[in-house]
Amino acid sequence: MPSIGPTSPNAARLRRNATECEQRLWAVLRNRHLEGFKFRRQATVGPFVVDFLCAECRFIVEIDGGQHDERTDASRTAQLQSAGYVIHRFWNHDVVENFDGVVERIRLELLATRAG
């Protein structure tokens, strides 16, 4: 079962080289800006590095660009879900074209998780 682990060197590199979409979303998720939920960026969960993690809700947000292999992502998502994580994937295009909608969807899902 994947658990939150120490930061991997790969995660640290990914944080340093964040995409513009990741940086933009991080500005909203960091420092409990979104409804008081604490997020980590490029967090290690089991063997995976996820883009954004709210550990208290077991909630993961992934921002995918064109380089993502959907079969690999599906397997990874299934493993994380079987460990009790909720995963929300957004394409870079979604973040660029509908940023407010992406943030609102994340916010509503987090609130629903909190309500429980």
Image (tube, rainbow, N blue to C red):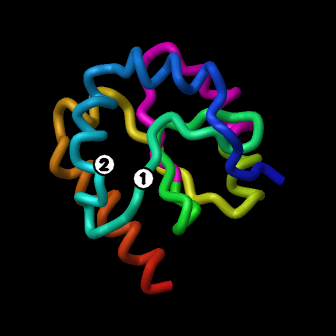
Q: Position of residue 20 (x, y in %)?
A: 26, 22
Residue assigned mark 1: 39
Q: Is residue 4 above or below residue 95?
A: below
Q: Residue at x 74, y 37 (%)?
A: 75
Q: Are marks 2 and 1 in contact (CB under 8 Å)?
A: yes
| Residue neighbourhood size for the residue with mark 2, other residues' Cα within 10 Å, grouped as few (<14), some (14–19), many (≥20) | some
Q: Image quarter for residue 5?
A: top right
Q: Residue at x 29, y 53 (%)?
A: 31
In the image, what residue type sits under mark 1? Phe
The spot of residue 57 in percent (x, y) is 53, 67
Q: Is residue 77 magenta?
A: no
Q: Residue at x 43, y 85 (%)?
A: 115
Q: Please, which residue is most extreme toward the bottom here?
A: 115
Give the x, y percent position of residue 29.
30, 50
Q: Mark 1 packing: few (<14 Cα in 10 Å), some, or many (20+)? A: many
Q: What is the spatial separation of the Cα atoms under label 2 and label 1, in whole angstroms?
A: 6 Å
Q: Residue at x 17, y 33 (%)?
A: 97
Residue 26 horizontal side relative to residue 69, left or right: left
Residue type (three-letter) at the residue carrying disc 2: Arg
Q: Which residue is mark 2?
A: 30
Residue stretch rendered in magenta on the structure? 60-76
